[in-house]
């Protein structure tokens, strides 16, 4: 058995299912999530809509041209986030270190869970299925991308396991269409040009010279070639965080000054929570239940620096209220990530060099909260005398961030 058993848990059409709610009959009809405010691309679609050739990310006009009776459902990003957080917590309850890929897609390495579940992969998968408590497709493979592909090919009650290493993963992926690359957000634009060039399957892509692919498509082309060959980056499990939130039901549809006052009250309540333990806040999430057409609105806000001052937090959050697409009937504010303990007082004999390093690490942490784990990197010399510039240095994660 391979030393890496990357497992993908796939819940098809999670966002559409949450948005539909109790109107389950809509899932059997041509239905799609309406575009986000200001956007033109539809979200997840039902199986009946797929039969008309409609897929997520298609322009609304083209989708309606293919199916004039397509039903559009307002998206519910706040409800999806809450439901998805509960499912991730359920997976973590069996001991899994989970990397959420997108709402409805999560990966974890089952190898470290074998001893906890009798040494059998089937027992680990059964435990994951019981913990989720909803119909889920499970795929197991040596890499993340192959595991996600296996989950899409798996049946509801029969996991698909690709045993072995990268060679076996490459053979498994070879007959699959290059459109599978859309499963990675950064590669969503590649399948169309690949198909125009006559590259229809991942096997055909893997057979191409990597230098030629990189020369034509750059970094994303190199990544696509690596995925087609059965490779991928290591998993990046999330760090489970505490759930600290405050909500306020508004007596009537509110906007303008009323909404600003409600936000100020939520900020004060959030900072007064005992669970905060004096810590500052790196990022928060504002969510609102909308009056017109139903649905919800959700906005993540990362501060320029970790804050614990209610005045500065209001100044940063209030302009975001204007982005709500409709009047609000309920408003919620939740902590996304905590920062260090809020204190401006410094020691009398602190070493200036240590203080600079501490501030640098804090800046790196804040940058990663805003732009992801690759937001701050350092240059590491590898072969400074090489004639090839690419071999002289590499980018590596900044330690201590």
Image (cartoon, rainbow, N blue to C red):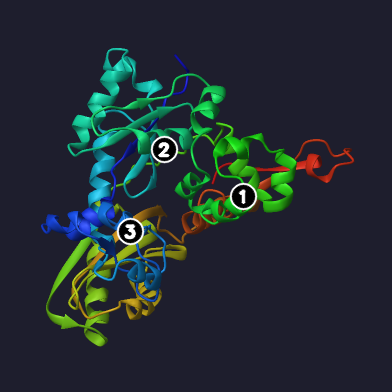
| Mark 1 secondary-structure assignment | helix
Residue 68 appears in the figure: yes
Q: Residue at horizontal 34%, vertical 22%?
A: 113
Q: What residue is shown with label 2?
A: 148
Q: What residue is shown with label 1?
A: 220
The Cα atoms of the two marked residues, 2 and 3, are separated by 25 Å
Give the class, few, some or many, for how many residues have Cα within 10 Å of label 3's Cα (few <14, many ≥20): some
The Cα atoms of the two marked residues, 1 and 2, are separated by 18 Å
| Mark 2 secondary-structure assignment | helix
Marker count (numbered): 3
Q: Nearer the viewer, residue 387 or 277?
A: 387
Residue 278 appears in the figure: no
Give the class, few, some or many, for how many residues have Cα within 10 Å of label 1's Cα (few <14, many ≥20): some
Q: Residue at horizontal 41%, vertical 68%?
A: 59
Question: In the drawing, does residue 21 fall left or right of residue 102?
Answer: left
Q: Residue at horizontal 47%, vertical 39%?
A: 236
Give the class, few, some or many, for how many residues have Cα within 10 Å of label 2's Cα (few <14, many ≥20): many
Residue 129 location (% of width, % of height): 23, 31
Q: What residue is shown with label 3?
A: 52
Q: Quadrant of residue 290?
A: bottom left
| Mark 3 secondary-structure assignment | loop
Q: Nearer the viewer, mark 3 or mark 1?
A: 3
First in residue order: circle 3 vs circle 1: 3
């Amino acid at each position: 058995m391979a030393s890496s058993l990357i497992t993908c848990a796939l819940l098809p059409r999670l966002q559409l299912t949450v948005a539909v709610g109790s109107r389950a009959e809509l899932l059997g009809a041509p239905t799609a999530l309406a575009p986000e405010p200001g956007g033109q691309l539809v979200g997840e679609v039902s199986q009946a809509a797929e039969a008309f050739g409609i897929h997520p990310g298609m322009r609304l006009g083209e989708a309606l041209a293919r199916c004039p009776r397509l039903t559009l459902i307002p998206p519910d990003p706040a409800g999806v986030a809450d439901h998805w957080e509960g499912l991730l917590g359920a997976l973590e309850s069996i001991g899994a270190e989970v990397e959420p890929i997108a709402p409805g897609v999560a990966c974890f390495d089952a190898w470290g869970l074998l001893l906890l579940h009798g040494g059998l992969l089937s027992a680990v998968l059964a435990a994951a299925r019981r913990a989720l408590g909803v119909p889920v497709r499970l795929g197991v493979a040596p890499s993340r991308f192959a595991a996600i592909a296996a989950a899409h090919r798996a049946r509801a009650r029969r996991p698909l396991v690709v045993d072995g290493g990268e060679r076996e993963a490459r053979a498994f992926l070879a007959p699959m269409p290059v459109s599978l690359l859309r499963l990675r957000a950064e590669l969503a634009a590649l399948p169309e040009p690949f198909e125009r060039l006559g590259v229809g399957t991942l096997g055909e892509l893997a057979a191409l010279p990597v230098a030629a692919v990189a020369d034509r498509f750059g970094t994303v082309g190199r990544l696509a070639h690596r995925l087609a060959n059965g490779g991928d980056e290591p998993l990046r499990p999330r760090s489970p965080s505490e759930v600290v939130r405050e909500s306020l039901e508004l007596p009537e549809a509110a906007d303008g000054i009323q909404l600003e006052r409600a936000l100020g009250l939520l900020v004060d309540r959030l900072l007064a929570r005992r669970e905060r333990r004096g810590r500052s806040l790196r990022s928060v999430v504002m969510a609102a239940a909308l009056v017109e057409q139903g649905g919800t609105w959700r906005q993540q806000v990362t501060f320029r620096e970790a804050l614990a001052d209610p005045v500065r937090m209001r100044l940063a959050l209030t302009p975001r209220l204007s982005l709500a697409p409709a009047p609000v009937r309920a408003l919620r504010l939740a902590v996304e990530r905590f920062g260090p303990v809020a204190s401006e007082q410094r020691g009398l004999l602190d070493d200036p060099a240590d203080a600079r390093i501490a501030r640098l690490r804090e800046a790196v942490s804040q940058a990663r909260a805003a732009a992801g784990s690759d937001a701050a990197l350092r240059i590491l010399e590898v072969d400074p005398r090489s004639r090839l510039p690419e071999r002289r240095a590499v980018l590596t994660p900044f330690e201590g961030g």
